[in-house]
Image (cartoon, rainbow, N blue to C red):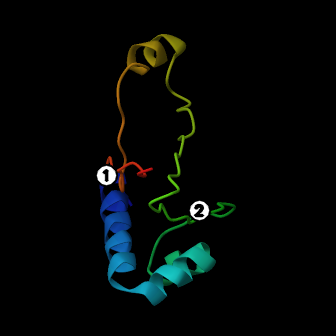
Amino acid sequence: MSKEEQSKKIGQLIAKCWADESFKQKLLADPMATLKAEGAELPAGLTVNAVENTDKVFHLVIPAKPTDLSDDNLDKVAGGTVCCTGCTGNWPQD
C-alpha cells in the first residue's frame, strides 16, 4: 500500500470514529485488531497505539527520524512545518 493510500485509509478510519462512537471505542481499546478487521496491512512486530485528542489534551506525535536523511538535509528542513493526517491545527483551549 502506498503512502497516499495509507493516508486515505487513515482519513477514512478517523471519519468512521467521528461517525460511530462504538467503533471509536473499539479502536481505542484494541487498535491492532480493529485495524486488521478494517483491512489495514500491518507489518509483523508493529505496535499501534490509538489515542484521542480532547479539549484538554493534545498528543504531539514525533515521527521516527528518516534513515535516509543526512544531517545536512535535516538542518535544511528543521525550520519547516510538517503536518500529517489528522492534524487540524486546533490546539486545546484553556
Q: Nearer the viewer, residue 37 or 2?
A: 37
Residue 36 visible within the image: no
Above or below, 85 against 34 in this view is: above
Q: Nearer the viewer, residue 17 or 73?
A: 17
Q: Dividing the image into 4 quarters, which one contains the N terminus?
A: bottom left
Q: Residue at x 44, y 81 (%)?
A: 38
Quadrant of the rendered image containing residue 48: bottom right
In-image side of 59 versus 30 (left or right): left
**Residue furthest front in the image:** 94
Residue 7 visible within the image: yes
Quadrant of the rendered image containing residue 82: top left
> Label 2's element?
loop
Q: Residue at x 43, y 85 (%)?
A: 21
* Mark 1 residue type: Thr
Label 1, label 2: how far apart the Cα atoms are: 28 Å
> Label 1's element?
loop
Q: Nearer the viewer, residue 44 or 64?
A: 64
What number is the disc on residue 88?
A: 1
The residue tagged 2 is 43
Residue 90, x across and y down, in percent: 34, 51
Q: Residue at x 38, y 65 (%)?
A: 10
Image marks 1 and 2: residues in contact by CB distance under 8 Å: no
Q: How many marks?
A: 2
